Amino acid sequence: MKTIILGPPGTGKTTTLLNLVDEFIKQGIRPREIGYFSFTKKAALEAATRASVKFGLSADHDLIYFRTLHSLAFRMLGVTKDKMMSKEDYREFGLRCNIPIKTASYSNEDGIFNSDNEYLTIINTARVKRMELMDCYDLRRNLLDIERDTLFLLDQELKKYKAEKGLKDFTDLLEEFIERDISPKLKVLFIDEAQDLSHLQWEMVRSIWNKAEKTYIAGDDDQAIFRWAGADIDHFIALKNEVDEIQTLKQSYRIPGGPIHELSQKIISKVTNRYEKTYNPRQETGLLKYYTDITQVDMSQGEWLVLASANHFLNDVKELCELQGWYYQYKGINSLSLELLLALSNWEDFRNGKELNYLQIKNIYRYLGANVTPGYRDAKTLKAEEKYTIKDCMQNHGLLTDKVWYESFEGVDTITENYIRNMRANGEKINKTPRILMSTIHGAKGGEREKVLVLLDLTAAAIKQGDEDPDDLHRLFYTAFTRAKQELHIVDPRDFNKAYTI
């Protein structure tokens, strides 16, 4: 028995799957007989955590098959971390072959291979797509300056290097899992985020479901945005011809009614190969606004998610935030460290007579530099169990100033000082995640916020790829637009020749 569950944006796909898990457990199926595999570590961990809380089970001992496919292969093969290719191994390999490799690694989150070396990228892409290396080269040679002979020889040298060192990579794990056919025997199998699986992963999934009594395959082909990394969306869509049942979740708990829902449907209807599906938005009507320039966007209030097709398109947004004094996060890094912001806040309290503890003072001393006597800067003369006034520290613990922060904190340049002043004037909260999160569309998949800002700019490579197969771009921006819970804001690109056209 095989069932496809289609989950449009915000329709509660994970909740639906866990409710099914609940039903099977109540029927007497043991948790160790249930497999729940997801494309990303985050999604797999979320499912395991929610299941452990809901059912009172141990994620480590009971829900042993709630994990990513890479993690399953790792476990079943008995591989240890020291036998996996590391960033340092790739750098050593690059030096041996006299090729520049600054970055090369498999993401622990989703197993996707990332490298600044295009030769390595093509080699891995061919493997996950189950293609001949030279066929993969032929598909990409118009986009890249790659030498065929070098590509072939490098592939051979990489195999030799791994064999010599006794090392494996994530792709090796999946290949060996399939070859050895070591799938666990399961009563029920759940495959989540199916739209993101590669051809190689689909082979692994099939080897697992061959030993399972029931299989549920959940995903949304409309949100398939990882084809560049090898995702085989055509395989997912073709499954409709061999499953017993197809279910579509009908109610979105995220997407508001009105213009946001209408725009998203307009975009996704352009995709030529997809599951035909409809879903109902929330009754609340959303807000849709267009802008000709990023400076027109007022992000002074509320929680925002700012999305672009590539990171460098977010630079103008960063500049705007810094000019206006808006607290933001970019690539997972806050615009100002929490340590510095806490030091500033605590310093003002300190100056106003409040007693601080050892950790608070130690953090302040980190930023005072020469305003603390050498030998006292590590705050070792302070006792962890006691609190101190600024007078205590000036008399006994090496503090040399009680002036305002911008006169006392060393290393804070004028631009940063003005940014901090504006942040504080705006009342920005520093004790939680910044209001404004910036990300690529790929990086924000699965996320949501009350207000979403999308930039329509495209790289030259994306434009070229879009000309050859526009479906990928339609899915990308559909995914971006459907992150919004209340408001969607869209900014025109600087160059209309390099823009996604709505």
Image (cartoon, grey):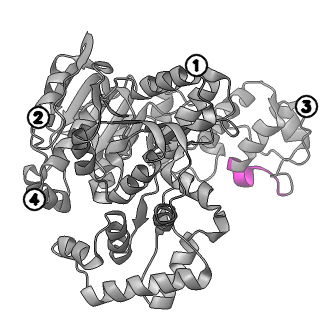
Of callouts 4 and 2, the N-terminal one? 2
> For residue 354: magenta?
no
Of callouts 1 and 4, the N-terminal one? 1
Which residue is labeled 3 in the image? 386
Q: Quadrant of the N terminus?
A: top left
Identify the disc placed on residue 269.
Answer: 2
Q: Residue 320 or 69: which is nearer the viewer?
A: 69
Tell me which amino acid carries mark 1.
Answer: Lys
In the rendered structure, the answer to whether residue 277 lies left or right of residue 402 reads: left
Instruction: Tell me how far mark 2 sits from mark 1, CA to CA.
Output: 40 Å
Tell me which amino acid carries mark 3.
Answer: Glu
Q: Quadrant of the C terminus?
A: top left
Instruction: Tell me how far mark 1 sits from mark 4, CA to CA.
Output: 50 Å
Which residue is labeled 4 in the image? 468
Q: Are the residues tagged 4 and 3 within 8 Å (C-beta)?
A: no
Question: Residue at 51% of width from left, 29% of height from top?
Answer: 424
Q: Which residues are magenta?
A: 367-374
Q: Secondary structure at mark 1?
A: helix
Q: Residues within 10 Å of mark 3 (few under 14, many from 20)?
A: few
Q: Residues within 10 Å of mark 1 (few under 14, many from 20)?
A: few
Question: Residue at 15% of width from left, 74% of height from top?
Answer: 142
Can you tell which of label 1 and label 3 is closer to the viewer?
1
Which residue is labeled 1 in the image? 26
Q: Secondary structure at mark 2?
A: loop
Tell me which amino acid carries mark 4.
Answer: Glu
In the rendered structure, the answer to whether residue 375 lies left or right of residue 428 reads: right
Of callouts 1 and 3, the N-terminal one? 1
Question: Residue at 54% of width from left, 22% of height from top?
Answer: 22
Can you tell which of label 2 and label 1 is closer to the viewer?
1
> Residue 101: x percent and y percent?
44, 77
